[in-house]
Image: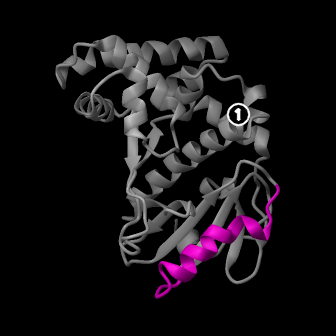
Amino acid sequence: MERLFKHDFPDQIKGYDKRKVIEIAFAGGYPEPLALQSTRYRKSWFNDYVDTLISKDLRDISNIKRVSVLKELVKILAAWSSKFLDIPDLCGKLSISRQTFDSYLNALESLYLFERVPSWSKTDYARVGKKDKLFIADTGLMASLLNWNLEEVLLNPDRAGKLVETLVYHELSIQSEMYDAKIYHYRDRENREVDFVIESEDEQVACIEVKAGSAISKSDFKHLEWFRKNIVKDRDVITIILYPGENALSFGDGLLAVPLAALWE
């Protein structure tokens, strides 16, 4: 996070290619399944973990009777990780009311299974969307609940993108708390999007786009550039793309592509 706000990254970082990043995401961050060598055992652990939370721990914090619907909601929301909450659509899929959905989602957040990222609304009030972004608590849990296969995900840009963005969110979230920074996202009515907008305690702003592929071009920065020039034009805004690779690549005018490994190295 300090490197981010100083815009100071080394030219080369011992990075990871796309396959390695997806493998890290599939493993997740929970200590117990990380110690298991078998994918089958990991899936079993994740399923037991969710069942235990919903069947036992949930009773201590909420009076939810339709447990089967809640379990189905967990799997549906896992597929929505890194996407915008479309609550009417989700209510329709489950045949539940908005009030019921809100109570179920609040319960799942209380169990630390999901988190929401608010939209950046400090400027551009008329144009900006108000939907939260949703993230599941762990990428290993996400891949297991959705019964994803690593080789298939490598060939599926949508799944790879959601998984990698969720992985990045958790690393940014941890470091942002340590740095007293806040995380937002941005999307407006013209569908211009910025994956993460981070504001530091002293009101510095960093805009981050996440790419699951290793090929980066100047056009990938178009929404970051637009946000910097039109939304927070009165500030010195840092704009980077995080991608699988080893080299920090400059595209001029403060635009930088940075290896995902910079989150850890």
- Residue 151: x and y in percent read 78, 27
Q: Quadrant of the C terminus?
A: bottom right
Q: Which residue is mark 1?
A: 23
| Whole-percent x, y for residue 111 in the image | 31, 30
Q: In the figure, 243 relative to 98: above or below?
A: below
Q: Nearer the viewer, residue 81 or 23?
A: 81
Q: Nearer the viewer, residue 115 or 193?
A: 193
Q: Residue at x 75, y 39 (%)?
A: 20
In the image, residue 90 lies at what x, y percent?
A: 41, 31
Q: Residue at x 32, y 35 (%)?
A: 109
Q: Is residue 72 left or right of residue 56?
A: right
Residue 220: image location, x then y, percent: 72, 64
Indicate the quadrant where residue 200 lies.
bottom left
**As drawn, 152 above or below 231:** above
Is 124 displayed left or right of 221 in the figure?
Answer: left
Instruction: Please determine whether, in this image, residue 228 is positioned above or below residue 146.
Output: below
Q: Is residue 96 left or right of residue 33?
A: left
* Residue at the spot 18% in from the left edge and 24% down from the top edge: 62
The magenta stretch spans which residues? 215-236
- What colour scheme does the image use? one colour
> Is 84 one of the magenta-colored residues?
no
Tell me, yes or no, if residue 30 can be seen here.
Answer: no
The local secondary structure at tag 1 comes to helix
